[in-house]
Image (cartoon, rainbow, N blue to C red):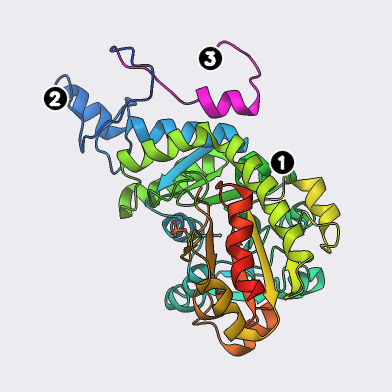
Amino acid sequence: MNNDNPGFDTLAVRSGQQRTAELEHSEAIFATSSFVFENAAQAAARFAGDEPGNIYSRFTNPTTQAFERRLAAMEGGEACVATASGMAAIMSLCVALLKSGDHIVSSRSVFGTTTTLFDKYLPRFGIQTSFVGMNDLDGWKRAIQGNTRLLFLETPSNPLTEIADIRVLADLAHENDCLLVVDNCFCTPALQRPLEFGADLVVHSATKYLDGQGRIVGGAVVGPEQLVAEEIFGVIRTTGPSLSPFNAWVALKGLETLSLRMQAHSQQALQVARFLVDHPAVEQVYYPGLQSHPQHRLAQSQQHGFGGVVSFVVSGGRASAWRAIDATRILSITANLGDVKTTITHPATTTHGRVSDELKRQVGISEGLIRVAVGLEDLDDIIDDLSRGLDG
Ligand SMILES: *Cc1c(COP(=O)(O)O)cnc(C)c1O
């Protein structure tokens, strides 16, 4: 690019592309597992690391690299490495940066499978995790030990949209020689760039808003060259959770419309949240864009929009929640989010179904809670669809 300091949307549309000799306008998909060498000496030089270039698509692939360069530019990070899924991103960074005897402090309000990784699998390799309330700063402080290496969180949290103060937790991490990792799935770099607030690493599930149309599973880690391009990349090229070129291409093209989609998701979600606040069958609404949200100001200071996820509690517990969900005709009953299609789910029996009753109480997942990831259908149709079950 010629422009010295392109804006966010220009980066989203233009950065990372390297045209081939065919001068294709749109980015090409390099559907190839390996790459050929001019001669045996070049092969040797590539393998020895003396000459840059592609060898094999478990290591690098031009389409995947285009996605990585673009996402790094959008997050304001030095480097990005793509992974086969969001969980592969989190697993790879743990394998790369931790060893037996190390300790993680994690927000209690993280993606369920992340909790399972921290709670069930990492302890087999001698890595323990303490879970704390996301906004309990004293809790974070108390949980940090001499062997703590990572602080981990998601903001806004799923499903209750609590907001963490990234700068405060980044400072806490650095005072204790730890890294702060932020899962930026809900906001994406279009709405929030955690590295600007001092986070060390950002992880993504590209499955969600980066693709944005529910077509692929993918993930990524963004951060400093040394951590990402060397340590985490080293684990990925060795252990194999690399992103396929086709999936990388879908996510790459998704980034081009990310900003517009995130603004549209945010606008629609705010209208849905306001409708729910006024509805007599609804006891409580969780959406950071509402003035009544306890961290509305913090969300305003750290985000450029409030995102597409709205959660709410209906009176009458599980029976009422299921009735409202089953009365929808347009909304998709599915646990995924980050799609142009609106999705609706009952966290207590799906995403958090395996979580103990005690933990559900601690994180505030009640039987009347419904989570909606507001899509881009006509707003009136979304609201009509929700009304049917709530009014009845
Ligand atoms: C979905 C999700 C993940 C895991 O991503 P996959 O692509 O499903 O592996 C991690 N974090 C958050 C916040 C998610 O929503």
Main secondary structure found in the magenta portion:
loop
* Residue 8 on the magenta span: yes
**Pointer 1 or 3: first along the chain:** 3
Residue located at (66% from left, 61% from top): 310
Q: Which residues are magenta?
A: 1-21
Residue hosting label 3: 1
Q: Position of residue 205 (x, y in %)?
A: 49, 53
Q: Nearer the viewer, residue 120 or 264?
A: 264
Residue 370 appears in the picture as rendered = yes
Q: Residue at x 78, y 52 (%)?
A: 299
> Could you say where residue 25 lies in the image, as x and y percent from the top left?
38, 17
Residue 164, percent from left and from top: 74, 60
Residue at the far left in the pictured view: 40
The local secondary structure at tag 1 comes to: helix
User: On the picture, is 390 further left or further right than 1?
Assistant: right
Q: Position of residue 312 (x, y in %)?
A: 69, 70
Residue matched to label 1 = 196
The amino acid pointed to by label 2 is Ala
Of callouts 1 and 2, the N-terminal one: 2
Amino acid type assigned to the residue bearing label 3 in the image:
Met
Q: Quick one: SS at disc 2? A: helix
Q: Marks 2 and 3: which is nearer the front?
A: 3
Q: What mark, if any, has residue 40 been given in the picture?
A: 2
